Amino acid sequence: MYQISFFIHTLLFLVFLSISGCQELSGIAVSKSGGKTTPEEMAALKINWRGQAIKREELSKTAEIDKISESKANDSFAISDIKSTVAEQTQSPIISEPILPKPPQDLDPDLFLGKTNDALADRLGAPTIVRKEGVIEVWQYRLSTCVVDFYFYPDGKTQVVRYTHIRSKFLNGDIDRANCMVNLLQFSEAN
C-alpha cells in the first residue's frame, strides 16, 4: 500500500514539474547590486518569445539603437534620426519580378475562315501550290514542319476560306499542331 501511494505522489510531482516547466513563472529576482530588483530591471530580465521573430542581422542594429537611446534619452531628435537611418539601412532593395520570355506566338489557320483569297495572300504571301477541284480552289503552303491547306469556296463573285487542314509533310506522319502554327507565323512574317 505504501509503495502505491509513493508511486502516485511521485507521479503527481513529476506531472507538476513538467507542467510548471512549460509555464512562465515569476519569482524573486536579485539585482546585480544584491538588493531587490526594480520593475525596469524585471522587464529587462523577462523574455517573452511569443510572436517574436528576430533576425540575426537585426540584433546588432537593435542593440546599437538601444545603446544610443540610453545615452541620449533627452535628445528625441537624435533617436528618431538614428532609427530612421537604421531603418533605411535594413530595408531590402526592391527586387523586380523576373521577366519571363513570351511563349512562342502562333498563327492558327482557322483565323482565316471567311477571309478572301486576297486577304490570305496579303498575310501569308503566295501559296506553294494552287489547285482547283471543280469550283473549289485549294491553296497549299508547304512549311518546314507541316503542310497547311486552305479551301476556298465560291461566295458570290469572290471565294472565301471555308475549311483549313493541317497535316504532316509525310504520308501517315505525326503532326505537332502547335509547332506547325508557330512555323506558319514565322512563314507569314518572312513574306
Image (cartoon, grey):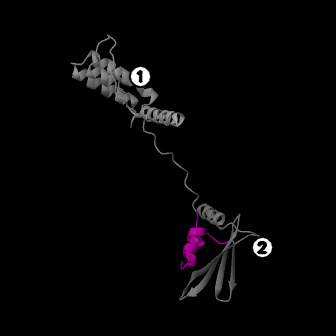
Any part of residue 23 in sight: yes
The residues bearing labels 2 and 1 have C-alpha atoms spaced at a distance of 72 Å
Is 187 on the left-hand or right-hand side of 22? right
| Residue 80 image point, x, y percent | 26, 26
Residue 42 figure quarter: top left
Q: Is residue 108 magenta?
A: yes
Which residue in the rendered view is the most extreme toward the left? 74
Label 2: how many residues lie within 10 Å, few (<14), some (14-19) or many (20+)? few
Q: Is residue 117 above or below residue 1?
A: below
Q: Amino acid at mark 1?
A: Ser
Q: Is residue 8 above or below residue 189?
A: above
Magenta-colored span: 106-127
Q: Amino acid at mark 2?
A: Asn
Q: Secondary structure at mark 1?
A: helix
Mark 2 lies on residue: 172
Any part of residue 92 in sight: no
Mark 1 lies on residue: 60
Label 1: how many residues lie within 10 Å, few (<14), some (14-19) or many (20+)? few
Is 39 on the left-hand or right-hand side of 177? left
Name the foreground residue: 103 vs 157: 103
Q: Is residue 95 above or below residue 25?
A: below
Name the foreground residue: 119 vs 9: 9
